[in-house]
Structure formats: C-alpha cells, structure tokens
Image: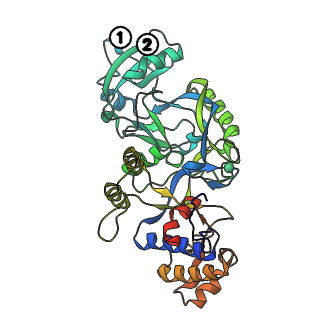
Amino acid sequence: RLGVLGDWDNPYLTMDFKTEADIMRALGDIYKNGYLYQGSKPVHWCVDCGSALAEAEVEYEDVNSPAIDVGFKVVNKSLASSKFSVKIENTDHSTNFDGDIYAVIWTTTPWTLPANQAVSVNANLTYDLIKTSRGVLILAHDLAEATLARYGEVGAKVLGSCQGSDLETLALQHPFDKRQVPIICGDHVTIDAGTGLVHTAAAHGNDDWLVMKANFPNEKPRILMGGDGKFFNSDLVEFEAIRGLTRQEANKVILAAMTESGVLLASARLNHSFPHCWRHKTPLMQLATHQWFIGMYEQDAVGISLREYANKAVDATEFFPSWGRARLEAMIKNRPDWCVSRQRNWGVPMPFFVHKETGDPHPQTAELLEAAALLIEARGVEAWFSLDGAAFLATHEALNAADYKKVTYTLDVWFDSGATHAAVL
Ligand SMILES: [Zn+2]
C-alpha cells in the first residue's frame, strides 16, 4: 500500500559473503589500475581507537591549547642580515645590533616541535627584521604590529625588509634538538594568524607534508610518536626528556625547556575548534602512519587520473536539483587522496600479501586477491583473519612466499558503501 517495491527474496546485505568478496574485488580493480599506493602521510588519528579515521568520523569541538611563539635562532647571522640589506657592522648606530636573530613561529601544538623539519614562509610576502628587547626577530610585515603588541613590545625598530623568497634555504637552529632546519617556501603560509612563519612537521599536518614533499621529495616525515599517543622510547627522539610521554605531558616539558633556554618568546592559552573522535569524544591528532591510499592524481595505463574520470562523470550527469552539480564538483576538486586502510578488528580485510622488508605487494597480487575473494565468498571475512598466510601462499604456488606476509588492515567502511554498485548491480 505504501508503493514500496523491492526484490525481497534477493536483498542487498553488507555481510553477505558474496558482498564481502565483491568489495575485495573492487579494491583489486583499483589496485590493477595503479591507483592504490602505500605511504606515511598524516591522517586523523584517534589514540583510543588506535586507528585512522575518515573525515565523516571527525567532529569539531572547542579545546583550550597552549599558543606559543618560538624563536628558531638563525645560524649565520651575517648571511641573514645581508638578506635584509642590513650590515651588522654599521657606523650608523641606529641599525646596529648585538645578539642573535630569530625566525619566529607560532603554534598551538608544542608537542609537534620535536618532529619539526623546516620553517615555512610565503615567497610573496614581505618580512621585516626587527630589533626588540627579546632579540632581533624575523616577522611577516603584515603581522609584525599585532605580534609585537602581543609581546608587549614598545619601541621596536625595523632594521630592514625582504621577500620571503630571499629567505629560502637559510639555516636555523632547532629550539631544543641539535638539528638545524631550513627555511622553505610554501603557499599555505598566510597572514590569517601567527607570525607569517610556520613551524613545519610533515608527520603532523597535511600542508606540512605537501610542502616538505615539494621541497625535499626524498625526506621522510619525522615520526616520533606511536599510535598510542606516546613518544617512542627510541634514539629517534633527540630530546630525551619527552621519551614515553603523552602529548599533554610533553607540552609541559617542552615549554619548560624553551623557557629556560630563552627561545620561548610568548606563551598564552587559546580556545579554538579542534577535531575529535565521534566515538570517544577525545581530541584527535594528525599523525603520519603507514597507510594505503587511493591516489586522486595517480594516472592509469592510459595516463588518466581518477579525478579526471570523476570530473568527466559529473559533466555527463544530469542533476536534480541542478545545484547538486556544483556541490559534487567542489567536493571532487578539493578531495585529497583517500586513506582507505584501517587498523580495526572488524570490517572487510585488505587481502594483500606484502614484502616483509620493502612492503611492496606480491607480484602475483591480482591472482592471490581473487583466490582470497573466492575463500571469503565461501566462508566470510573471518576466513581471512584466521588464514595461515604461509600455507595460503604455498597452496597458490606464490613466488618467494617466505619473503611475504599477510596484511591485517581492514577497509574504511565508506569503501564498502562505495563498492555497493559492484556487489549489487
Ligand atoms: Zn576514537
């Protein structure tokens, strides 16, 4: 009487073994087309889930964070001065200065400073060299007044100015590690807030990851924190006092160390909107971990990316109502690569075997994946979780089987729903 029609004897059920197997096959097609890749890229990470989260699993709530200004000491003072056309030895005493030059960054996540790899500036912004009671500071011209007011500085004097692009490659001393880090240029640096110089840690932010990849394609993110939200107890962590600590604990230790060494130029508290886990309601972090991604820019055998296919499909679709088109277009245009792997004990497995050292998928992945799909079709996803990987590889006469191990990750549930067409139609 409601006019509802359905193929009631043949429903679509997500936990049908056939559906589970077809989800795997959809993943196999994406792999075969060359869109699937592995990498260490920052993702939303919940310490309580112990897993990456999808955008749709992220909620925003206000948190109160430390907001600090930190000086990265310029290693070569006279080189830096020359960028601003300022001579250190100047007979005109008005521009003379002693002491060190600091490139000043502003951050609300002090705990990410151990992972710092660079300080980013915008090539097209103007930067000032400013003599203050806290040393000689490099600040973006447009933010200098507000920044100095925040420090309570009066009588600061601008010694010289230059473009952000002039500062590129200038070496800076990390505020508490022994390392030196460079100044690099990136378009993500704006004058919305802060100092116009941005602390850059590829492990803890997508913009950071992208700008590091553009400048140093071979340099890996400094991953010093585990999925449990604690710093590793390893030599990778140069600043020993933070080993084994949580984010909140490390914030205190880092702030104390920087106060003592004099590089902490200002410290305040800030209320701001911050991503939280929708299940645990706890603050997330951006963390680079090993994950699998579907690349929106990767090209298939005929040189076409998924983004291009998707854009063409949108063009070829009629929308009711018509504004739906603009919405979908904007979504595809801005969509980053999709992190499809999850570290969960439930869900459809990613049925891959990877090399124990290189992590590369087995050369016979296409065949092995179909063999796994047949198994799941008969016995459901539990068959993969309980599978003896070595025996399975032996049965299917896989090459160099001893060098490969079973992947235990599962798929993002949004991949399951996205593969519905493949399983149902
Ligand atoms: Zn969670």
Q: Kindly indicate the quadrant of the structure image that contains residue 60.
A: top right
Using the image as rendered, state which of residue 22 and residue 368 is in the foreground. 22
In the rendered image, the residue lying farthest to the top is 155
Using the image as rendered, state which of residue 310 and residue 257 is in the foreground. 310
Q: Position of residue 222 (x, y in %)?
A: 53, 50
* Residue bearing the label numbered 1: 94
Task: Using a 10 Å C-alpha cutoff, classify the residue at mark 1 as few (fewer than 14 neighbours), some (14 to 19) or many (20 or more).
Answer: few
- Camera-side mark, 2 or 1: 2
Using the image as rendered, state which of residue 141 and residue 397 is in the foreground. 397
Q: Report whether the residue tagged 2 is closer than 8 Å to ligand 1.
A: no
Q: Is residue 75 above or below residue 211?
A: above
Q: Amino acid at mark 1?
A: Ser
* Residue bearing the label numbered 2: 156
The residue at the point 49 percent across, 47 percent down is: 202
Q: Amino acid at mark 2?
A: Ala
Q: Is residue 77 above or below residue 340?
A: above
CA separation, marks 2 and 1? 12 Å
Q: Is residue 110 above or below residue 366?
A: above
Q: Report whether the residue tagged 1 is closer than 8 Å to ligand 1.
A: no
Q: Report helix, strand or loop for mark 2.
A: loop
Q: Is residue 247 above or below residue 374?
A: above
